[in-house]
Amino acid sequence: MMEEMFALRAKQTGNSDLAELFKLSERPDVISFAGGFPDPQWFLPEVEEIGLEILRDKRDVALQYSPVPGLTRVREFIARRMDKQGMPARTENIMITSGSLQGLDLICKVFLDPGDLVVVEAPTYLGAISVLDSYEAEIVSIPCDSEGLMVDKLEEYLAGTAVKPKFVYTIPTFQNPSGRVLNLERRKKLVELCSNRQIPLIEDNAYGELRYSGKELPTLKSLDARDIVVYLGTFSKIFSPGVRLGWISAPGYLINKLILFKQSSDQTSSSLSQLLALEAGTRGLIEKQIEITRKGLKLKRDLTVNALEKYFGDNGQWTVSEGGFYTWVQINGPVDTYKALEPAVKEHKVAYVAGRSFYPDRSGENCLRVCFSLVKEDYIEEGIKRLARVFSLA
Amino acid sequence: MMEEMFALRAKQTGNSDLAELFKLSERPDVISFAGGFPDPQWFLPEVEEIGLEILRDKRDVALQYSPVPGLTRVREFIARRMDKQGMPARTENIMITSGSLQGLDLICKVFLDPGDLVVVEAPTYLGAISVLDSYEAEIVSIPCDSEGLMVDKLEEYLAGTAVKPKFVYTIPTFQNPSGRVLNLERRKKLVELCSNRQIPLIEDNAYGELRYSGKELPTLKSLDARDIVVYLGTFSKIFSPGVRLGWISAPGYLINKLILFKQSSDQTSSSLSQLLALEAGTRGLIEKQIEITRKGLKLKRDLTVNALEKYFGDNGQWTVSEGGFYTWVQINGPVDTYKALEPAVKEHKVAYVAGRSFYPDRSGENCLRVCFSLVKEDYIEEGIKRLARVFSLA
């Protein structure tokens, strides 16, 4: 048995929810609220012209290796863009990554020995849980309420533990999976708490630019006077997940180690993708796409929430997100959404991600993540109706 | 000091040769024999049209997430291509990677706990050494002679050790850095040895399709009747490194774990890149580019070897490669090519990679890797002349 030769991390890892999820999302008769995919109708046709120009005029750069941390002009573009968003950033502190999850992977590579403590909010991004598991981290979950991570509870935890966590990972804005937003007071307190205790604070801001209602809040990074925040950005939700491009803005003590491990992971990210994103950004197309995406998401959120009202009524609660891709649904009464997933897909032809997938301790059995970004407008009500049937509510 | 929080692997890792190397390669007044870059004049202008078509007609796929192991049509294309090259491969055993180094990274993630043994040939690919170091592997080096890895020595080593290595990593064809080819008898023996001992044999075949003289030899994979070989392929040297695409063909016991760890590394590789490579391949453009690349490399190899004859003469030995990007030069007498690198670049305006970078034990002080693929034909002689000056031979 060759499997006996596997490392401990491989022996401990079972099959993955995310892989299953990608497969499910491919079946045409299933209405899928599962994968966090943008709607391709938001992709701009203008990229066609850009692709042609890059491969005609800059082929020698587009098809060649880029420097390990990314093409300098792309890093500069990102630094300027962050600056405009109130986050002072310097080109040399920015590294291009192959999606923002790779940013977290590389952070783990720098910080984590097996058994090291990491703090996350619960529920949290299931991709982050897989990455942390692959580094054999000891995950500490701090609960959330409607205002996001309960920073008081984090403070209590930190005051009571002898072992300092290696970092805190959080998605403060339009959180995956809950759609929740961390309120301003907590943002300030979280940055202060981590700064005082010198615990790196990883801010995953994949959805932050996709606000469609309510009032803008500062990112943790923009509140960070003492360089405690490591910021993860991505082009996946505002431009294209298919180009596999994210970035990390990290303090000086950290960035060179990240670059070093980037080099021994995939060496560098796609030059072609980098040029495509840069040209789209320079021509204002990313901002244009963000506007279109916001409008599209708002429409779909409204359809989703209205359908939930109609078909779930008093049988559950759900978040009404002000931005991003997700509604988080809690069903009243005893139900295991994880067990219900197979019949949901096979009999009821509807997919979602079960609550358990977002909790390191596999709780959240009566919850599910409803991602409304990819489902066609005309199918949202039908999809929610099928969901209600899965849980015998309709 | 935040650095105190770093993991052991990060504390142990110093600055990297490869990062320095990428920087050096950017200075316009330096003739660089350093980075293993293809010459952009070999990139085909036809990709321009393909880029346009993909972003016009398949935008919804090109800009969207691909399934974790890659787009099915791309995996099928690779399986068919391997089949034609005498390597039976099934689509479900193939996973797309973001360059072949990521393949090795993921293999390490599956197999290696800190301190685990891995066998490499010495000298070997410096990127592989960095990856193995990042997993805190215990690296065992088996020497090479002009016919490649000395399989006898490997056999002796395996017979004498109580601890079974987790895998053997080798580049049998046009090896990086030496340009050498493992002979047929040794290929057969190596596959048999690893099969009998049930030690996974990782074949990195980045350069195998780039033969410009001599007789074709079977890959290890094509000699593998007992599924011991894990095969790493890449589009970097035959199509484009900028698209960051490689693949791994792995036995059934391994492929699903690789897919799982791919998902928690960068989730999936660029769909845009995958479609570009697929279309180029389907239209015969990859084979066309390989032909052009072979011719270009042969010319450059000849210029390099002739210049070495002229300026190094009796002061050294070098390999006359039958394929690939590299000539490996050994200088007679006491010299440290690693120490000489800084003056070489700063004073003599010529770059290379020092021998030490390719030995896990940092030996090879009188050797250097001369990569002739990127240097313009007209500059090769001048570059070798500068190299001779670095070592006071001219």
Image: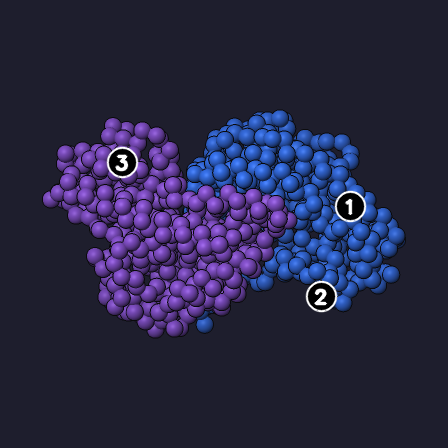
Chain colours: A blue, B purple
Q: Position of residue A19 (x, y in %)?
A: 60, 58
Please tell me which residue is depicted at 68% across the width and 61% down the height of the picture.
A27
Q: Secondary structure at mark 2?
A: helix
- Chain for mark 3? B
Q: Residue at x 25, y 68 (%)?
A: B185
Residue B72 percent location from the top left of the image: 56, 60
Residue A276 spot, x, y in % from top left: 55, 38
Q: Which residue is mark 1?
A: A300
State the separation of the CA atoms marked 3 and 1.
61 Å
Gap in angstroms between the C-alphas marked 2 and 3: 65 Å
- Which one is in front, A349 or B211? B211
Tell me the residue that label 3 is attached to.
B378
* Element under disc 1: helix
- Of A139 and B181, nearer the camera is B181
Residue A357 image-quadrant placement = bottom right
Q: Secondary structure at mark 3?
A: helix
Q: Nearer the viewer, residue B12 or B219?
A: B219
Q: Are marks 2 and 3 on the same chain?
A: no
Against B233, residue A214 (above or below) is above
Q: Nearer the viewer, residue A49 or A364?
A: A49
Q: Chain of mark 1?
A: A
Q: Which dot, 3 or 1, sits closer to the camera?
A: 3
- What amino acid is at disc 1? Lys
Residue in the picture at 48% in, 35% down: A57
Kindly indicate whether the residues beneath marks 3 and 1 are on one polypeptide chain: no
Check disc 2 and report the residue beneath it.
Answer: A342
